[in-house]
């Protein structure tokens, strides 16, 4: 009955999307694959949500409720069918200090504010700026996340006593755990080559669980982490004082969590899009993530964002529509309400094996080889983003990678500015400087050094046909050069500049030479409007 209801709900919700697009109608086979893929994802979500709840210092059900609510809302509203969202470690490590200092109610209030900020980002369409993240940063993100997922599984090789002290497992237990992990990985590999009708991870989990239960093997199971039994999440506004002091406490955390959540979600959106040949939806994903976090904060959840590991499980298992994400969330709720006793019997080793296969499939192994061929600056960006993702967090890694890439680009563009000289064909005795390369803040000083003011003739023509004026620094550099020529009584003429540059040039605008082949770009005008240099008239 549950399978039937979840499948019907998923078909109804996704039907509208398919009716308004060029995609073919859903087949019964694809629906079955998506439902089974959702079940696989739900099984993999359980230990992750519980573990991240422990990291954040909250009860396991807080993590499970977040995984259910965030997963369901983003599956229905999100910008990319096939993506899976839930409670994540990247957010949990930021939450832990807030919970420790102020309590869980402040966490719920922070999650609500985090969602509001993400909604604002979606409404303002800031999601489109994800396209500014260079490919080397994406490679570093993928590789770093793969390593983080792998390292997170090592915690399952530790046992903890009542006082919280941990020790690595050893002896027969270690060998049995390793055997079950390797067996799970082998079954995933084998099943994926034999059939596509059933997700390979689901087959592997079922076989390994049956083996453990049939032989009554004494290995850690999901129930050893925490009890999954619970009821429906109940609505309750965060119990915090509505004061400026409260806002001062939660706002910095909310900004950081919103940024990390959006960056991880949008990068995962791009990654899933590359695997499923889909584009767009960045701003839509921001709105979905924001809505999900506002709701989960009001229902006692710890918030969340896209999960690259579970998204990879879903896509590699054949999940291609919103059905998979919806059923994953509904299965997770069913585990909490009805199936906790059964799910708690699944050996953790089986889920660790699944995640290790995710690590192998997620890591961009070809990047190791291509780093020997690409520019050293790009290779350095990949390495730096990977290392920072592992040692710090995703947001810092991506920001660092973007800054590094931008500086490399600016330096390379700045060094391309140069000029060739020739006698003028139209002005007798005049010398023409033909400028090559973009003129912007990075190349402005190099532009000034191109001219030999004292040696040049009385008339100089500066031709920008093969250049482009990009920003206010470039305009200022042109004005400075014109002023220097004017100071020694020489005449400067400017050719092939756009009309908006004419408007902005203060000292040399009157020296423009109008021509039918003048360029018509508006970057300088847009810049001037933003900076308040001049009015809105173009």
Image (tube, rainbow, N blue to C red):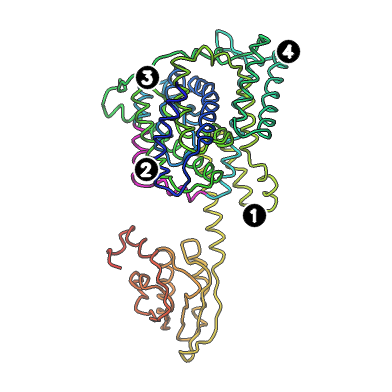
Q: Which residue is mark 2?
A: 122
Query: Residue 149 versus residue 271: which sits nearer the camera?
Result: 271
The disc at residue 171 is 4
The disc at residue 233 is 3
Pointers 2 and 4 in contact (CB under 8 A)? no
Is residue 14 shown above or below 238?
Answer: below
For the residue labelled by badge 1, is the local secondary structure a helix, a strand or a loop? loop
Front: mark 3 or 2: 3
Query: Is 69 included in the stretch rendered in magenta?
Result: no
Q: Which residue is mark 1?
A: 375
Query: Residue 66 versus residue 472: which sits nearer the camera?
Result: 66
Q: Residues within 10 Å of mark 2 (few under 14, many from 20)?
A: many
For the residue labelled by badge 3, is the local secondary structure a helix, a strand or a loop? loop
Q: What's the CA distance linking mark 1 and mark 2?
A: 35 Å
Front: mark 1 or 3: 3
The magenta segment: 113-133
Query: Is 116 included in the stretch rendered in magenta?
Result: yes
Q: Residues within 10 Å of mark 1 (few under 14, many from 20)?
A: few
């Amino acid at each position: 009955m549950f399978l039937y209801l979840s499948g019907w709900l998923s078909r109804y919700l996704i039907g509208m999307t398919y009716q308004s697009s060029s995609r073919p109608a859903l087949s019964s086979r694809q629906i079955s694959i998506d439902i089974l893929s959702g079940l696989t994802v739900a099984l993999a979500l359980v230990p992750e949500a519980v573990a991240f709840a422990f990291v954040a210092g909250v009860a396991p059900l807080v993590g499970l409720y977040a995984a259910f609510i965030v997963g369901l809302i983003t599956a229905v509203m999100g910008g990319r069918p096939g993506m899976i969202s839930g409670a994540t470690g990247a957010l949990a490590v930021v939450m832990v200090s807030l919970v420790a200092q102020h309590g869980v109610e402040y966490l719920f209030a922070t999650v609500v504010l985090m969602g509001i900020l993400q909604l604002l980002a979606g409404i303002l369409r800031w999601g489109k700026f994800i396209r500014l993240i260079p490919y080397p940063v994406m490679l570093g993100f993928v590789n770093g996340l793969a390593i983080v997922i792998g390292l997170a599984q090592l915690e399952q090789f530790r046992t903890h006593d009542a006082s919280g002290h941990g020790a690595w497992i050893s002896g027969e237990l270690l060998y049995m755990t390793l055997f079950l992990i390797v067996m799970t990985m082998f079954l995933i590999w084998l099943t994926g080559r034999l059939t596509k009708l059933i997700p390979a991870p689901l087959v592997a989990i079922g076989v390994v669980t049956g083996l453990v239960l049939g032989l009554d093997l004494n290995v850690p199971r999901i129930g050893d982490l925490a009890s999954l039994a619970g009821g429906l999440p109940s609505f309750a506004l965060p119990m915090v004082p509505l004061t400026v002091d409260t806002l001062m406490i939660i706002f910095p955390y909310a900004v950081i969590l919103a940024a990390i959540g959006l960056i991880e979600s949008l990068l995962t959106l791009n990654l899933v899009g590359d695997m499923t040949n889909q584009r767009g939806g960045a701003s839509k994903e921001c709105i979905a993530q924001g809505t999900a976090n506002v709701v989960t904060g009001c229902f006692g959840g710890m918030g969340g964002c896209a999960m690259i590991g579970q998204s990879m499980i879903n896509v590699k298992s054949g999940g291609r529509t919103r059905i998979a994400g919806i059923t994953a969330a509904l299965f997770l709720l069913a585990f909490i309400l009805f199936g906790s006793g059964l799910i708690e019997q699944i050996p953790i080793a089986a889920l660790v094996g699944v995640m290790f296969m995710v690590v192998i499939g997620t890591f961009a192994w070809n990047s190791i080889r291509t780093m020997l061929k690409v520019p050293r600056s790009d290779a350095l960006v990949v390495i730096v983003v990977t290392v920072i993702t592992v040692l710090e967090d995703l947001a810092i890694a991506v920001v660092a990678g973007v800054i590094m890439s931008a500086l490399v680009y600016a330096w390379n563009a700045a060094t391309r500015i140069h000029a060739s000289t020739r006698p003028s064909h139209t002005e007798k005795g005049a010398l023409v400087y033909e400028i090559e390369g973009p003129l912007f803040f990075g190349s402005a000083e190099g532009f000034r050094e191109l001219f030999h003011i004292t040696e040049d003739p009385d008339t100089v023509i500066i031709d920008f046909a093969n250049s482009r004026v990009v920003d206010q620094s470039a305009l200022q550099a042109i004005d400075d050069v014109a002023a220097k020529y004017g100071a020694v009584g020489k005449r400067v003429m400017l050719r092939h500049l756009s009309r908006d540059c004419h408007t902005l040039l203060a000292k040399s605008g009157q020296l423009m030479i109008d021509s039918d082949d003048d360029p018509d770009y508006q970057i300088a005008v847009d810049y001037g409007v933003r900076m308040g240099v001049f009015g809105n008239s173009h």
